[in-house]
Amino acid sequence: MRLSGKVAIVTGGAKGIGGAIVTAFAREGASIVIPDLDFAGAKLKAQEVEFKRRERLLTLPQ
């Protein structure tokens, strides 16, 4: 958990490279904010990570 206690803001984190970064940072323990134009996609990514970590993430419409 190298990123435990850190907050990451991953723009475009709903899918693609941003989505992979969200997954990797979450795996390392970071709290994550996902601002994305695809708000529904960002919510889905947050739910995917929340399910694995049992922790809430913040999504923001841009």
Image: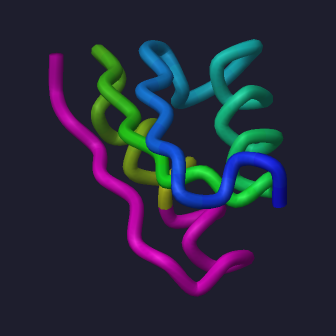
Q: Nearer the viewer, residue 55 or 61?
A: 55
Look at the picture and state if 34 lies above or below 2: above
Q: Quadrant of residue 59?
A: top left
For image coordinates 49% across by 23% down, the residue present is 10
Residue 15 screen position, x and y as percent: 64, 25
Q: Quadrant of residue 16?
A: top right
Q: Nearer the viewer, residue 39 or 29?
A: 29
Residue 37 screen position, x and y as percent: 29, 15
Residue 34 screen position, x and y as percent: 39, 34
Left or right for 32, reference 51: left
- Image quadrant where one finds the N terminus: bottom right
Q: Magenta segment range? A: 47-62
For image coordinates 79% across by 29% down, the residue present is 20
For image coordinates 67% across by 29% down, the residue present is 19
Residue at the outermost bottom position:
54
For image coordinates 34% across by 41% down, the residue present is 40
Q: Nearer the viewer, residue 19 or 44?
A: 19
